[in-house]
Image (tube, helix red, strand yellow):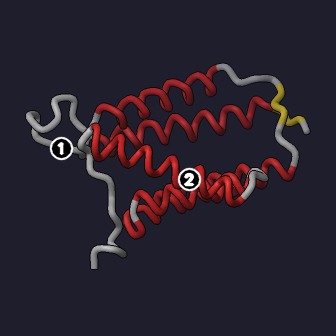
Amino acid sequence: MSSRGSGADRAAGAVLALAGVAVGIEATTFDVAFLTDPVGPKALPFLVAITCTVAGVHMLMTPREAVDLPPGDAATRMAAAAGGFLAYAAAMPWIGFFLSTTLVVAGLAYLFRGPWKGGLLAGLTLSTALWLLFVRVLALPLPVGTLWTR
């Protein structure tokens, strides 16, 4: 399926640039003592903000002539994956990092036609590895989930 790219690229570029600016504005509200983290919690969000804004402005200025859109089934799965990541972000404070990460990886594996058990195993493995990296190696706390702390 092909679509005229100029308007679609400009719309996507505008949304991406605005999202980058919004992330940058939100990052200015983060505040941690300098001795706790010399780079501060603003570094990664600012990097994301700059990247999104630059990419969005580039898309606004240099749109492609034609864009090949994915077929309906792939587009539906891509939209479901985006919804899964939004649900992941919303669920993490409630059910915690470990369970939400396991579920989103398993769900994505199933969504893209992977085996359910393999996706669950991959989710458990990834959650464990990331938890060990962040909590044990980097000493950065991850959300446990309010469901488990009541």
Q: Is residue 95 left or right of residue 87?
A: left
Q: As drawn, which residue projects farthest toward the bottom? A: 150
Residue assigned mark 1 = 31
The quarter of the picture where residue 21 lies is top left
Instruction: Report the residue at 55% width, 37% height from top.
Output: 16
| Left or right of 97 on screen, residue 138 | left
Q: Amino acid at mark 1?
A: Asp
Number of labels in the image equals 2
Q: Quadrant of residue 143?
A: bottom left
Residue contact at pointers 1 and 2, CB within 8 angstroms: no
What is the x, y in percent for residue 114? 75, 51
Q: Is residue 22 left or right of residue 115?
A: left
Q: Where does the image place residue 102, in percent across and percent down from the top left?
A: 53, 57
Q: Quadrant of residue 7?
A: top right
Q: Residue at x 52, y 55 (%)?
A: 124
Which label belongs to residue 123?
A: 2
The disc, 1 or 2, on the residue closer to the chain's N-terminal end is 1
- Please, is residue 17 above or below residue 145 in the view? above
Mark number displayed over residue 19: none
Q: For the residue labelled by badge 1, is the local secondary structure a helix, a strand or a loop?
A: loop
Mark 1 nearby-residue class (10 Å; few <14, some 14–19, many ≥20) = few
Whole-percent x, y for residue 72 in the image: 86, 51
- Whether residue 139 sits left or right of residue 6 in the image: it is left
Q: Please state which of residues 130 and 90 is positioned toward the viewer in this rendering.
A: 130
